[in-house]
Image: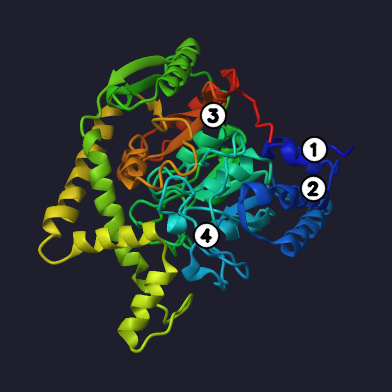
Amino acid sequence: MSESWHSLSISSLAPRLARREVSPVEVTEQLLSRIAAQNPALNVYITVDEDGALAQAREAEARLARGEGTPLTGIPLAVKDVLVTEGLRTTCASRILENYIPPYDATVCARLRQQGAIFLGKVNMDEFAMGSSTENSAFGPSRNPWNPEHITGGSSGGSAAAVAADLCVAALGSDTGGSIRQPASHCGVVGLKPTYGRVSRYGLVAYASSLDQVGPLTKEVRDAALLLKAMAGYDPRDSTSAPVAVPDYLETLGRDIKGLKVGVPREYFGGGLDPEVEAAVRGALATLEGLGAELVEISLPHTDYAVAAYYIIATAEASSNLARYDGVKYGFRHSGANLLEMYAHTRTQGFGAEVRRRIMLGTYALSAGYYEAYYRKASQVRTLIRRDFEAAWERCQVLAAPVAPTPAPRLGELVADPLTMYLSDIFTISVNLAGIPGISVPCGFSRAGLPIGLQILGPPFGEPVVLQTAYALEQAAEVRGRRPSW
């Protein structure tokens, strides 16, 4: 039996590729075979680019033979279907873009291609990244590899499930209100949301432009650092891209965290937190304390207002961003007796129920007479939430908290109750409102065998200390290396 190259992390596979112990073609063929066998049950991939992936693998093999490889050369990745890829279908899990083929690459995709990475295909998500379970997909829900009767989380659920099920080596996702960290927690992988502006959003199909950020989902923390280093950096094509130098994120990994002050927000441990999640998170905090970190109780007093503020800001921006999908320029079109009827039919049939709901909420919040009462007020609350974090950084270097209030729910539990779905993001959305970095690291399991993650947060552009803390926990955690039996 051939070796299971597909199960290796980037950090484990890259040296083997460089030493020519295995070729990129062999690894890619193995992964494509697994996708063909397992994707029908898990519904992770929307589009598999078999010919393109093999062509990229052959190119990577030639590059390694010339001694021109990088740590990402020959590494097969999955790409969330919200990032445009030249010549490869990009749907955003929506019927309105079902047959859209972009003429260019997103900046993050272009940078990874330059490094020699291989794109296996595009993975499932909540339509236009609007959801927390990957059940709001026009192509059906993805299933959790730990238990296919449960959700993957969302909106980057396909990315998280693909990594957990070894259907790629690592994946790209996007995070608007927890969409990388929450599915990473539910699927037992590492998910990093960078500082807003750290990674270019050019070519990321916009949901809420002031909140969206691209980031990696990986099998281990070191891989997240590797991918972030390759993706990050100023991009003149993105007006929100920060002209801040990119450090070597691998440098802090393995450094002692003795004396590190870890803030524990008291508001994140109140009612609604599942006892099993709290036990796993408290255990992880004890592990950090055992490694020499100092736990400091802090307060984020405006946390209770975060959900309301987020769902006004996000839906208002979504209403504006999705106005372009009108059936005229590109994408799905449904005919009508006149222009207005064509617009109405196209958008009614092209968008799913959750997307339509959020467009209507956002349009109402921006409408005449309501802007001041809703969007402006939510923006003021956002400032207060950011100031809460700024006060916290005066007392500690990182924060640690739960990612989600419960382990992954069963399929169908959230879609029938949108409010419960919105509240499932209560521990993650403040991070997007404040624009700070955060990472989810596996820290335990429920009695039913479902993964639970710990969220580590840092100040703006504080990814080095976030990764340092996450790596220390990962190396000491008892759950390290545990994989689903799928």
Q: Is residue 206 above or below residue 174?
A: below
Dot 4 or dot 2, earlier in sequence: 2
* Label 3 vs label 4, nearer the camera: 3
Which circle marks residue 83 in the picture? 4
Instruction: Tell me the residue that label 2 is attached to.
Output: 30
The quarter of the picture where the C terminus appears is top right
The residue type indicated by label 2 comes to: Gln
Dot 3 or dot 4, earlier in sequence: 4
Dot 2 or dot 3, earlier in sequence: 2
- For the question of whether residue 464 can be seen, the reply is no
CA separation, marks 2 and 3? 26 Å
Horizontally, residue 132 falls left or right of residue 187, namely left
CA separation, marks 1 and 3? 23 Å
CA separation, marks 3 and 4? 27 Å
The residue type indicated by label 1 comes to: Ser
* Depth check, front residue: 385 or 168: 168
Q: How crowded is mark 1: few (under 14 residues within 10 Å), some or many (20 or more)?
A: few
Instruction: Tell me the residue that label 3 is attached to.
Output: 451
> Are the residues at dot 2 and dot 1 in contact (C-beta closer than 8 Å)?
yes
